[in-house]
Image (spheres, rainbow, N blue to C red):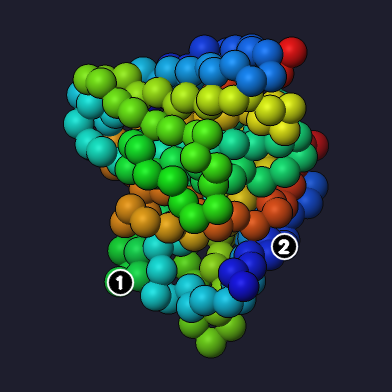
Amino acid sequence: QSALTQPASVSGSPGQSITISCTGTSSDVGGYNYVSWYQQHPGKAPKLMIYEVSNRPSGVSNRFSGSKSGNTASLTISGLQAEDEADYYCSSKRSSATHVVFGGGTKLTVL
Amino acid sequence: EVQLVESGGGLIQPGGSLRLSCAASGFTVSSNYMSWVRQAPGKGLEWVSLLYSGGSTYYADSVKGRFTISRDNSKNTLYLQMNSLRAEDTAVYYCARAGYSYGYDFEYWGQGTLVTVSS
């Protein structure tokens, strides 16, 4: 059971916007609106940034937004800031005994 | 305030057993969907197991038949019993509480406990 596909790395300058993609299949990303995104700084636990494709938990900046089209979900970060530099993971419900599947992760570098 | 504190990790030989604990505070474990998620050194996240509030359990294929998730309501603690450990089980193990989506998202995380399987 392969993970969802994310780019290994993305980069952007402060103030710019970047988008991270997360590609799955109709058995996961495309079949359900249960896509989440997590931010993880080195040595820290992941932090939930987006749930159910496009919803932000309380306290998460509105610079973070999520969307989905077909089998691909996306996380967009606008107005990049230095503290956004981290690893980002997507996850989705999967229609099998594998309850949840994660993407391989994307390292965001703020130039 | 919601807090999750894992313990029980360590160095274990292949084929051995280990039990991880996740002590919760600020909420009731038995009323929530609780999962274990692991992360091998330098690698991505992998969902391991889920315990529904109703008691149903689910496992990743990679651990099915070897790992068992459970809880002690009197101690408000989640457990992961890991048997027949393999080198590929080496990872930081996080316990996590679902937030919004029936166990498909993880809003609260512990700090993690490292399990190293090696001879």
Instruction: In this rendered view, identify the residue nearer to me: A36 or B104.
Output: A36
Q: Distance between the residues labelled 1 and 2?
A: 25 Å
Q: Quick check: B25 left or right of B68?
A: right
Residue A100 x %, y %: 38, 40
Above or below residue B65? Residue B43 is: above
- Looking at the image, is B96 positioned above or below residue B38? below
Image coordinates of residue B40 in percent, x first then y, are 65, 33
Q: What is the chain identity of the residue bearing mark 1? A: B
Q: Residue at x 68, y 13 (%)?
A: A13
Q: Count residues near mark 2 (Cα–Cα under 10 Å), then give few for <14, some for 14-19, many for 20+.
A: some
- Can residue B110 be seen here? yes
- Same chain for the residues at labels 1 and 2, yes or no? yes
Q: Mark number for residue B54?
A: 1
Tell me the subunit letter for badge 2: B
Residue B7's tag is 2
Question: Residue at the location (49% across, 60% down)?
Answer: B97
Of helix, strand and loop, which one carries label 1?
loop
Amino acid residing under circle 1: Gly
Say what amino acid the circle numbered 2 marks.
Answer: Ser
Residue B77 quadrant? bottom right
The label number, if any, that marks residue B31 in the structure image: none
Q: Report helix, strand or loop for mark 2.
A: strand
Residue A15 figure quarter: top right
Extreme-bottom residue of the structure: B74
Could you tell whether A58 is left or right of A9 in the image?
left
Front one among B48 and A22: A22
- The quarter of the image holding the C terminus of chain A is top right
